[in-house]
Amino acid sequence: MKCLVINLDRSADRLAHIVAEFARIGIAFERVAGIDAKEHPSLALQPQHAIHATRPLAGSEIACLHSHRACWTIIAQDDAPYGAVFEDDVVFSGKTGALLGDTSWVPADADVVKLETVFSRTVIQRTRTSAGHGFSIFRLRRHHSGAGGYLLSRQTARDFLQATAHVNIAVDDLIFDPTISVGKTVYQLVPALCTQDQFVGDRLPSLLDQERDAARTASGLMTRQRKPTAVRISREAGRAMRWIADFCRLRRQIVVPFGSIEATDQANSGLPAGPIPSAAKTRYRRRRKGKADLDIWQESP
């Protein structure tokens, strides 16, 4: 299975980071030159999916999609049944090499396996399948943001290329939002084998955030307004109903944890010694919604 890494030509620091990460886990990778929005300002004028009507995608987000499309093209043309895609700011857990070196643990019906966590609450099926080496896989039943690390089948790569041939959509919406990726069987690896450095090391800030936040500020989405009482009551009632529905369908909420990093691995990766910083365990800034939200670092009952 090929491991593909998206990296902009101007991001030499991130290339050095990801080279060190793959060397640490003993896995080879192939660099895929990312599409740079700064060199293609017309990207923001391209057609966008209807879900982005309220807040159109920024040029950098569309460039991100095209970068992932470049990876999907490679996977679609490869002989291997699966391929893995990573962004260049991920940090790997200590046992990542064992899973990336052998795909026998991947369920036969899997179209996509999400390998990362962004520490936001999501919903998974309760049924657990062992992936070995302390990892398990669950069906992903609700949106889980981020496209920093995932595995997808050759046919799914072809399907995603076709779906985005004439319209742009946020990468993680396309892949990890069940209301959009209808018909795809998507799994979540628990614990995650990677996460973005911004959550555990804070050395490589997101390249998308600055332009994305500017766009949300301009559209007014960054301004928090108090909802009317009736709206808040309706929202809470909806949450309760979804929880009941999930419980009846043998689903549960979870904040996907990040796999452990051995002490020697922490030294090699440049991460702070000791446990992962608590800030990454207790908060996740939902930039997509323009607000900060607290999440508890545990699986809900």
Image (cartoon, grey):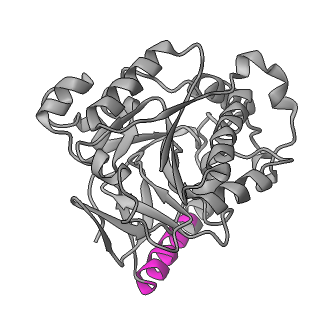
The image quadrant where one finds the C terminus is: bottom left
Q: Quadrant of residue 290?
A: top right
Q: Residue at x 62, y 34 (%)?
A: 223
Q: Main secondary structure of the magenta part?
A: helix
Q: Is residue 44 left or right of residue 190?
A: right
Asked whether the viewer can see residue 142, the reply is yes
Q: Position of residue 47 (x, y in %)?
A: 87, 42
Residue nearest the observer in this picture, 7 or 217: 7
Percent position of residue 117, x then y: 40, 48
- Residue in the picture at 63% in, 27% down: 34
Residue at 14% from the left image edge and 27% from the top image edge:
273
**Residue at image x 69%, y 45%?**
73
In the displayed structure image, the side of residue 94 where residue 123 appears, left or right: right
Q: How many marks?
A: 0
Q: Nearer the viewer, residue 141 or 20?
A: 20
Residue 245 magenta: yes
From the top left corner, tell me how far across and down residue 215 is, in percent: 70, 28
Q: Please, is residue 236 above or below residue 53 in the view?
A: below
Front in this rendered view, residue 258 or 81: 81
In the image, the segment drawn in magenta is 235-249
Residue 228 lies in quadrant: bottom right
Closer-to-camera residue (227/239): 239
Q: Is residue 256 magenta?
A: no
Q: Is residue 175 above or below residue 196?
A: below
